[in-house]
């Protein structure tokens, strides 16, 4: 079983849609390459002017539901939340297909999410489903043990790029990172300001550790995906937190999606019953 949805999922647009960026493309996704990644935004009134503010990312797990980190919702404060599917270039200059906005009508935060950011996972329920297209697709969830390529998992978003003066990027980033074992990750974090007594909660997995290759501020909630031998991508993590960005030997921490698959399925089942 690939996903909680019976629709196709986890298909990366390797051949891209319409055109290809050439030249130095390190850290830059191609148009439509990661079609399951959504932008999460909040609409707030600032000095009597309505402003759309980027607060993070999410992944599309069904046409009407997205998966994200619980802390992303808290960044929206009291503003209304919406998601944008099919986004890529914020300037809108090159996109061939229109992005789609959906209002978030309901947020479901894990019951045991706490101030230590354990159980950092949430669902976003839309007012109406997104229309799936070449640039808007579902990601698979690992509902059973699956063999993954642990050396080249992918994530991406519109957060800061530490190589560009920590500016938010216009074009969705694509970051390739290897998974790191729990004990190795905990040991790496103990070399930072977290200290020698730091305990990495079991709700997190780790990836990265290569210098200048990392997600950063603003990428919270973005999916970490790995491919199976057939090339289908599954979401195994959610961008959660890190110590700095792109420091050699220091990975990023991601919510362990596999650990919460039963929680996700239970909430999805309840949603389907509510909408009957």
Image: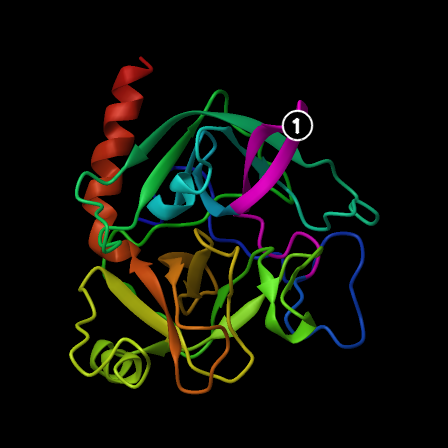
* Nearest to the observer: residue 76 or residue 65: 76
Q: Which residues are magenta?
A: 30-55
Q: Is residue 86 visible?
A: yes
Q: Residue 132, percent across and down?
A: 58, 35
Name the outermost residue toward the right: 93
Q: Residue 8, percent across and down?
A: 47, 43
Q: Residue 127, percent across and down?
A: 48, 20
Q: Secondary structure at mark 1?
A: loop
Question: Which image quadrant is residue 112 in?
Answer: top left
Could you tell whether 44 is left or right of 209 in the image?
Answer: right
> Taking 170 as reference, is 21 above or below it?
below
Q: Reply yes or no: does residue 46 show up in magenta.
A: yes
Q: Which residue is mark 1?
A: 47
Could you tell whether 21 is left or right of 190 in the image?
Answer: right
- Total marks shown come to 1
Q: Is residue 150 visible?
A: no
Image colouring: rainbow
Point 53% across, 55% down: residue: 218
* Nearest to the observer: residue 55 or residue 134: 55
Could you tell whether 266 is left or right of 51 in the image?
Answer: left
């Amino acid at each position: 079983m690939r996903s909680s949805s019976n629709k196709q999922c986890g298909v990366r647009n390797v051949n891209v849609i319409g055109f290809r960026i050439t030249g130095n493309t390190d850290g830059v996704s191609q148009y439509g390459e990661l079609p399951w990644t959504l932008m999460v935004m909040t609409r707030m009134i600032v000095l009597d002017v309505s402003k759309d503010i980027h607060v993070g990312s999410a992944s599309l797990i069904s046409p009407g539901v997205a998966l994200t980190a619980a802390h992303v919702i808290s960044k929206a404060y009291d503003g209304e939340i919406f998601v944008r599917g099919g986004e890529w270039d914020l300037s809108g200059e090159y996109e061939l297909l229109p992005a789609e906005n959906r209002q978030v009508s309901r947020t479901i935060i894990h019951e045991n999410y706490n101030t230590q950011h354990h159980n950092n996972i949430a669902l976003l329920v839309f007012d109406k489903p997104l229309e799936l297209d070449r640039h808007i697709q579902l990601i698979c969830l690992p509902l059973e043990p699956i063999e993954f390529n642990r050396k080249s998992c992918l994530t991406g978003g519109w957060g800061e790029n530490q190589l560009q003066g920590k500016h938010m990027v216009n074009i969705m980033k694509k970051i390739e990172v290897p998974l790191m074992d729990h004990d190795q990750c905990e040991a790496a974090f103990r070399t930072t300001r977290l200290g020698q007594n730091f305990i990495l909660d079991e709700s997190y997995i780790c990836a990265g550790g290569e210098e200048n290759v990392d997600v950063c501020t603003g990428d919270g909630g973005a999916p970490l995906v790995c491919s199976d031998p057939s090339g289908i991508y599954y979401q195994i993590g959610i961008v959660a937190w890190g110590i700095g960005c792109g420091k050699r030997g220091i990975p990023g921490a991601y919510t362990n999606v596999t650990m919460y698959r039963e929680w996700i399925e239970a909430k999805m089942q309840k949603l389907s019953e509510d909408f009957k």
